[in-house]
Image: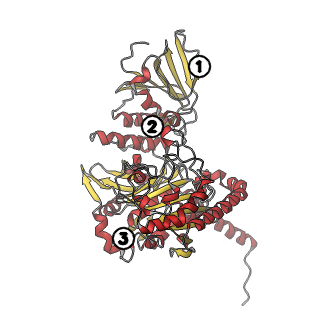
Amino acid sequence: MTSPFSIPRPSLYRVSLAIRLLTGISLYFAASLPSASAEDFPIASALIDSATWAQPGFHASWIPQRTTTRIAHRIWPRPGSQRGAPLPYPRIFGVQPQVISSRFIDGDIRSITLLFLDSGTHFGYIPRGNAVQTAKDNQESFNKLYTMTESAVRAGLTQIATDRPEKITLGSESLLQQEVEIFRTGDLYARMHKIEDQLVKVTFFLDAANAHSWLAPEARDIKPRDRAPAFEKNVSASDDDVLLNEIPIFPQGDRAYCGVSALSMAMQYLGLDIDTEDYAAGAGIRYGSTRGSNIRETYEAAGDELGFDVRRQTKFNFERACKSIDAGIPVLVWRRWSQQRDYLHTQYAKRRAKDRTVKLPIVDNNERALWPDKKAYSHASVITGYNSKLGEVIFTESWGEAVRNRRMRVAEMEATCYYTFYISP
Amino acid sequence: MRKTPPHPGLRIATAFTFIFFAGSIAVPLLHAIPSTFNNGIGVPFINPASMRLEDFANREDMWKQDAKLKGDWEMWNDPEIDDSTIELIHLKNSALVFGMPATEVTLQRRDNRPLRLVVVFSTADEKKPGNTQAQLTANINAWSGKSMELDSGSASLAYEQLSVQLTKAADSIRITLEPKDADES
């Protein structure tokens, strides 16, 4: 197996790049890297040379490897993860990234993102009641952290860039508009996102067109209606289950991001390449809390950005959801959630994967009394299938592959869902 | 024609009506923003043990002599246990068992061999009477794929390695997990 550190077979272009860049980059990073090990992200080559991305060893290092979707979100494991004692990532541009992730499409790496500072990742989940105090206590120090991070990352990018950065505006919808800078680094394009007191991240792309747009290549210059047949192809049916298995999963982690992660999962599948953190920033999720945020409006903005219609209803309509799934388009729901009920849905889905004869509890008054009510947590899920014969809704969470295609009775979804977002081309 | 200014009382009433209606619209919206965090994180037993307590209990090696226990345990005393050959230990980590927060988890051992796990769920602060028992029953059924029938506040079920018994007390529900082939009282 090729090591991520092995040098690719050089072309004349790469030799030229190496002479101009590698010495300087190595010197720059040498001061900030504690020690190189087989687990370290190969900074010196992966941020300037697309050939590194294609190396089998590099390719195989991202986790989870077992994903079945065309679009897959993977992360670079932290050093020590295999021994069960993960350490922080080595510094890049003098800053420890919070997460190093990549987006695979059809098995190839299409982009790599260094998330340097995301407010949600920094603060974790902050309950609504603590939101004001958390913001008050941390505003000044977080602002300093943002300024330092932004400045260090910019300086690092400038050092490896072969040209001046290009300033562009991504997006047309006000909630999703971002002023970004695109740096040419070797044969890659590095897009730097910076939103004050919220976000600093850099995404590396293989080509200029992807770096310059929120839209995936297949969604550019094509009317949404003309793309409908492509979505229908993603629908599969077996044992009375109708499933949409191509929805990528973007784990929200310990962040109050269920609403924006669910949106990102649905929208990236449909062709809008906006990350969870960008939606969080657009929606105004600050200091780890959703208090006062505009997530609902962000859903509508994402639809407009992609040229799709996002209709919000206060009730869950099973027939309409089925039609959407039949058309290969997921449905988003905001619903009441409880840990106790969640356990049942998880266990039932696990068991049913092994034994098709098991059934969810029959809906009666005793059963209804166990469903989460208006005092329960609010949660967002993606509807990814249905089973009309059993009267079950199949849904997926932004927690990881283990919670793909969980199930609940239609009556429970109807009773616990307070917003349904139907998307149509 | 000169307009007569509205009576101050009418203005106050109008203002209150407006505040009432604006508030009744705004309050549900404030609560409607979804913001759960990752399921599993914040479930303390799972993190040190990498599995749920009931899944841990369902492993054969859990019940072997000198079994290495997952989680953090301490010596415990229960005046109701008068058998001096039984050693009682208590789980220091908080734990969700069958999807519900346990009030207390203890393990009885004899000669360093685990005999039974006892999980207690308090029902003293239950908002809807009977809900804890009903949810536990539903969750045990979902976990095992079998149906646990209640009979005057007590129920049992045998599943893989385990015998699961649910008993109802005045202000608690007690679940006892022990190996199916246990021959000791």
User: Can residue A295 be seen at all in this image of the molecule?
Assistant: no
Q: Secondary structure at mark 3?
A: helix
Q: Badge 3 local density, few (<14 within 10 Å), some, or many (20+)?
A: few
> What residue is disc 3 on?
A218
Q: Amino acid at mark 3?
A: Glu
How has the structure been colored for display?
Answer: secondary structure
User: Can residue B41 be seen at all in this image of the molecule?
Assistant: yes
Residue ranking furthest to the top: B84
Left or right for B71, reference A382: right
Share a chain, discs 2 and 3? no
Gap in angstroms between the C-alphas marked 1 and 3? 63 Å
The chain carrying label 3 is A
Left or right for B8, reference A220: right
Residue drawn where x is 57% and y is 50% of the image: A90
Share a chain, discs 1 and 3? no
The chain carrying label 1 is B
> What residue is disc 2 on?
B135
Question: Which quadrant of the rendered structure holds the C terminus of chain A?
Answer: bottom left
Q: Position of residue A78 (x, y in %)?
A: 52, 47
Q: Badge 1 local density, few (<14 within 10 Å), some, or many (20+)?
A: few
Left or right for B158, reference A79: left
Image quarter for residue B146? top left
> What residue is disc 1 on?
B75
